[in-house]
Amino acid sequence: MAAFTNLGDLIPRARDLAKTAIIDLGGEGGPRKFSFAQIDAMANAVARALVGRGLERGDRVAILSLNRAEYLTAYYGIVRAGLVAVPVNFKFPRETIHFILRDAGAKLIFCDAPRAADCPDDMTRVVFGAEFDAFLDPGPFAAVVPEPNEPAMFLYTSGSTGTPKGVVLSHQSHIWVVETRLAAGLDRHRYLIAAPLYHMNALALAKLACAAHATIVLLPQFSARAYIEAIGRYRCTWLTAVPPMIAMMLRERDLLTRTDLSSVAFVRMGSAPVSSSLMAALREALPQAAVTNAYGTTEAGPVVFGPHPRGLAQPELSVGYPHPKVSLRLVDGEDRDAGQGVLEMKCPALMLGYHNRPAPTSPSAASGGGEGGPFTADGYYITGDVFRRDADGFYYFVGRTDDMFVSGGENIYPADVERMLERHPDIAQAAVVPIDDEIKWQKPVAFVIRKPGRTLSEDDVKQYALAHAPAYQHPRFVWFVDELPLASTNKLDRVALRRMAQQRVSRARRST
C-alpha cells in the first residue's frame, strides 16, 4: 500500500479513475455523479487557482457550505496547495461565524449561495456554482510535500459553552488516521455521509473512502426520510452517524417498512452515548448489519479503540478495546490507573494545539486547565470524558465531565441516567439535564420520547428510575416531547434543554 504524503492527495491513481467517487444529492440540481478523475482534476484546479491568486503556504482558506462535491474538492485543493483548510459550522450564529473566520485569518471563503450572506463583506468569497466553476484553473498540480507538523486544517470546536477554538491538525496526524483505518475490501462499500463535513465524523470518513477507492453517497444535510431513501435508492452499505440521527431514522417506521435496507452491512455510531434500547431497535431494523459503537475526538482523531487482542466479542455498549497504536489511561484524582476516570490518551493523531491560544505545553495546559490546551506534562491529551474499564479491558463511556452536575453531594452524569431510562420498554429516547435547587444545589429532570403507541406517565418514569438506580438520580420532573433539540453537530443540545427545563419549571411555579 502506497504511503500518502499530503492529506489532500489521497486518490489512488493506479486504480480505475473512471469509477464513481461521489454521488452528490446536494447542489443546485438533482443527483450528480463525479468520478475519481473528475474529483482529482477539480482539486488540482482549486489548488492552481489559489496559488495563482497569490495565496502562500500556510494561509487559511475557509469553507462555509452544506455538504456537496465541491466542498470536498475545495478541501482537497486547499490542502494540496500547502494551505490550511478551515471548515466552518454554518449552523452557528452569524456573529460566531465571523469570529471564526477572523480568528483563523481566512484569506478566502468558499461558500454555497445561501451562506454567502453570512460571510463578512470585507472578506473574499467564492460561491459554489457558476462562480466557483469560473474560479477554477484547470491543469496539473504537484501536491506540496508538507514539513513535519505542518498544519493541514483547523477544525473549530462547537462552542456551545464558550468561544469556539480552532483545533490545529497536521497532514501527518490524519494521514495516520487514514492509513490506520484502511483495510482490504473497503472499495466495495458505498458510504452514506449525511453528517456535516465540518465535523470530524464525516470529514474523516470522506477521506477514508477516497483513499480506499470507495463511493460516497453525499447528502447535503441530515433528514431522517432523505437518509432512509438514500439507503434504498443507492444501495448504501456503510452508515456512519451520531446516535440521535439513528434514533430519528428509526422513528420513521412506515418508510423503513417500505424501503429495502438489505444493502447495509455496517453501521458505525459515535460522538455521543449509545443506549441499549437504541442498539436493540437498530438491530431489529437492520438485522444483517454489523453495528459498532465507536468513540473519537476532534483533538485526537477517530482512532482510539478497536477489537480485543484475544478475539473477545465487543460488549454491546462498549466502545471497544484500546487500539494497539494508542496509549490510554483512566485518571481519578491521583490514581492514574483507575477502573473509572477521565480518559487521557496519546496517539499519532493528536492536535498540534489550539490556534491563537497558548501552546499546549503551557503550565495551565499541563494541569488540565486554562486556555492552553488539555495536555498533561507528559503529553497525554485530557479528553474530559469519563470512562470505565471492565475486567477484560473493554471501555465504556460514562459521561462528559462538562455535563456532570452535583445533586446533594452526589455526582450525576446525564448519560448514565439516560441509558438507565432508555432501558424502559416504553421509552424511545431520554435526555437528562439539571435545574437549580435551593437545597440540593441542582437536581435532575428528564425529557422523554415515548415509543409509538405506548402510554407512559410521569410517575411511571419516576418509579422506574427509583427502582433501577440510586434515588438521587431519579428525575424530579418528566416532560414528554415528540423530539429533542439537536446542536450543530447533531448531538443533543444540552444548553437548549437546560433553558427549556428552567422555563417549564418557572411556569409551573407561577401557576401554583
Image (spheres, rainbow, N blue to C red):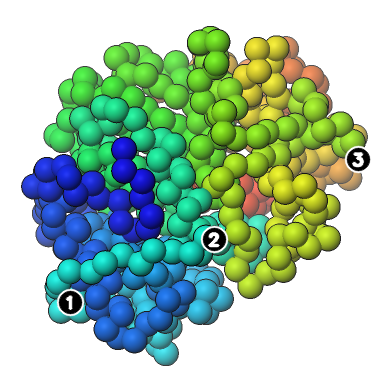
Question: CA separation, marks 3 and 1?
Answer: 67 Å
Which tag, 3 or 1, sits closer to the chain's start?
Answer: 1
According to the image, label 3 marks what residue?
439
The kind of residue tagged 2 is Asn
According to the image, label 1 marks what residue?
137
Residue 42 higher or lower than 227, as above or below: below
Expressed as whole percent of the image width and height from the top left, the position of residue 197 reads 37, 54
Q: Residue at x 19, y 57 (%)?
A: 39
Which tag, 2 or 3, sits closer to the chain's start?
Answer: 2
Left/right of residue 330 with respect to residue 316 in the rendered view? right
Q: Residue at x 31, y 65 (%)?
A: 143
Q: Residue at x 56, y 29 (%)?
A: 323
The kind of residue tagged 1 is Asp
Mark 1, mark 2: which one is toward the viewer?
A: 2
Residue 266 higher or lower than 164, as above or below: above
Expressed as whole percent of the image width and height from the top left, the position of residue 253 reads 30, 25
Left/right of residue 359 with respect to residue 26 in the rendered view? right
Element class at badge 3: loop
Mark 3, mark 1: which one is toward the viewer?
A: 1
Can you tell which mark lies on residue 13?
none
Left/right of residue 145 with respect to residue 136 in the rendered view? right
According to the image, label 2 marks what residue?
149
Residue positioned most to the left: 18
The kind of residue tagged 3 is Ile
Quarter of the image where the C terminus is located:
top right
Expressed as whole percent of the image width and height from the top left, the position of residue 235 reads 17, 30
